[in-house]
Amino acid sequence: MSIENKISVAGSFIYPHLVRPDVKFNADGEYKVTLKVSKSDASDMLKEFDKALEDSLADAEKKAKGKKIKEAPKPYTVEGDNVFFKFKMKASGTNGKTKERFTQRPLLLDSKKRPITNGTVIWGGSEGKIAYQLAPYYVPAIGAGVSARLKAVQILKLV
């Protein structure tokens, strides 16, 4: 199953950790951002996320040979007229297959799609779009779900 890159609609960033990884709960660090989008703009993205979630549940149920699989928490929440999508990327870790260490960071672009330099600080309230991949997973304790993997960020309005 191939995982394709998708582009979010424009939204407002909440607690962006895009320049430096957040190492509070994870020593390897994690780049992350929550994208706040109005419900009316988010309908296509919600359909994509829900479809990926259904596919992940169906796959897990096939592998579990008929056992009931619980649904993991969704990578988004709906509050009032807004939808909050959560995107994450591991800053470093060990490749499961090759056992090699890796480090990665999201590609940061400005409104004209030029790379953003290292000195730029991106605050909450900045606006932009996010390139992401929906990756299915199954963990017996949590259930089957989908994570939204952060790939790149285009800043449309820097705060």
Image (tube, helix red, strand yellow):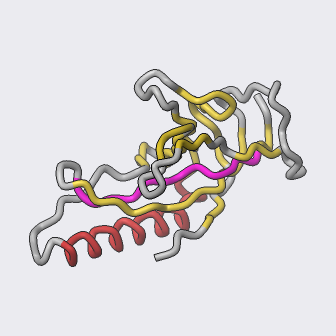
Q: How many discs appear?
A: 0
* The C terminus lies in quadrant: top right
Q: Residue at x 43, y 54 (%)?
A: 147
Horizontal placement of 62 versus 43: left or right?
Answer: left
Farthest residue, direction left: 67
- The answer to if 146 sits in the magenta stretch is yes
Q: Is residue 5 above or below residue 127?
A: below
Task: In this rendered view, identify the residue nearer to me: 95 or 42.
Answer: 95
- The answer to if 6 sits in the magenta stretch is no
Task: In this rendered view, identify the residue nearer to me: 78 or 61.
Answer: 61
Q: Residue at x 18, y 49 (%)?
A: 141
| Residue 41 percent coordinates (x, y) | 60, 58
Q: Is residue 119 above or below residue 3?
A: above
**Residue 5 seen:** yes
Q: Residue at x 52, y 35 (%)?
A: 30
Q: Residue at x 15, y 71 (%)?
A: 64
Task: In this rendered view, identify the residue nearer to me: 38 or 155.
Answer: 155
Q: Is residue 32 above or below residue 49?
A: above
| Region rendered in magenta | 143-154
| Residue 151 percent coordinates (x, y) | 63, 52
